[in-house]
Image (tube, helix red, strand yellow):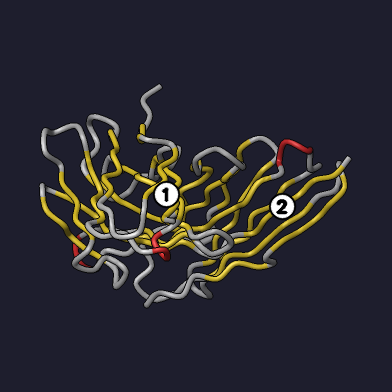
Amino acid sequence: EPEVTQTPSHQVTQMGQEVILRCVPISNHLYFYWYRQILGQKVEFLVSFYNNEISEKSEIFDDQFSVERPDGSNFTLKIRSTKLEDSAMYFCASRADEGTEAFFGQGTRLTVV
Amino acid sequence: ILNVEQSPQSLHVQEGDSTNFTCSFPSSNFYALHWYRWETAKSPEALFVMTLNGDEKKKGRISATLNTKEGYSYLYIKGSQPEDSATYLCAFPSLTGGGNKLTFGTGTQLKVEL
């Protein structure tokens, strides 16, 4: 069964460092998302990506964040200069079209120290 | 900002009990309502995508109903089992911005005890 894969599963980084979280969405899907969940809080939307560009982003997704789909299969989230409050579980998701459910990856637990 | 609320926040039931929880969402500009189950150490998995007022969907012992006019959906679990322990999330897709993002509720954390 097709699935969304994310790497790494866990990343520890020092404050101020850049991190790249990687995702491989399901191959025929058209909509891609990044969400995060800070421990004990609700799942928060970060950004959606469609037709090779960002279609919507939240207030959380400031200039420190960027997304790319460099080669038609990978979908990456870059955080340029990590802060302690960026520590969270980051989920990638993809959808085939507007009317269908989202498929989520297993998540990357980012710990900023 | 879309307001998607779930209640209760957490629930402890005994094996065999039936239970239900609520998701409330904006009733205007309704498009669809999703339910996901999120087990610890796994990724959220879709249970239902509901689109029609009055819709009722069922998957095994789990069912869901939808009232788009008043903006709520109920998720029911009949005869809860320990393996039903998970966080149940509802999500409201919106078409604004062209991104069709999903706004998630806060979730209901269900624990089923033997």
Considering only vertical position in the picture, is A96 above or below A34? above
Residue at horizontal 86%, vertical 42%?
A: B15
Q: Chain of mark 1?
A: A
* Position in image of residue A1 (x %, y %): 41, 21
Return the residue nearer the eye: B40 or B9.
B40
Return the residue nearer the eye: A16 or A66.
A16
Q: Give the position of the C terminus of chain B as an image quadrant.
A: top right
**Classed neighbour count for the residue bearing mark 1: other residues with Cα under 10 Å, few (<14), some (14–19), many (≥20):** many
> Which quarter of the picture shows residue B24?
bottom right
Considering only vertical position in the picture, is A42 above or below A53? below
Q: Give the position of the N terminus of chain B as an image quadrant.
A: bottom left
Return the residue nearer the eye: A98 or A81.
A81
Residue at horizontal 72%, vertical 36%?
A: B83
Q: Give the SS element for disc 2.
A: strand
* Position in image of residue B8 (x %, y %): 69, 67
Which numbered disc covers residue B4?
A: none
Which numbered disc covers residue A110?
A: 1
Find the distance from the CA under tag 1 to the CA under tag 2: 26 Å
| Residue at the disc numbered 2 | B110
* Position in image of residue B19 (x %, y %): 77, 54
Asked if residue A83 lies left or right of residue B23, the reply is: left
Asked if residue A37 lies left or right of residue A95, the reply is: right
Q: Count of labels shown?
A: 2
Residue at horizontal 38%, vertical 29%?
A: A3
Considering only vertical position in the picture, is B90 above or below A32? below
Disc 2 marks which amino acid? Leu
Can residue B85 be seen from the camera position used here? yes
* Position in image of residue A27 (x %, y %): 24, 29
Can residue B52 be seen from the camera position used here? no
Disc 1 marks which amino acid? Leu
Q: Give the SS element for disc 1.
A: strand
**Classed neighbour count for the residue bearing mark 2: other residues with Cα under 10 Å, few (<14), some (14–19), many (≥20):** many
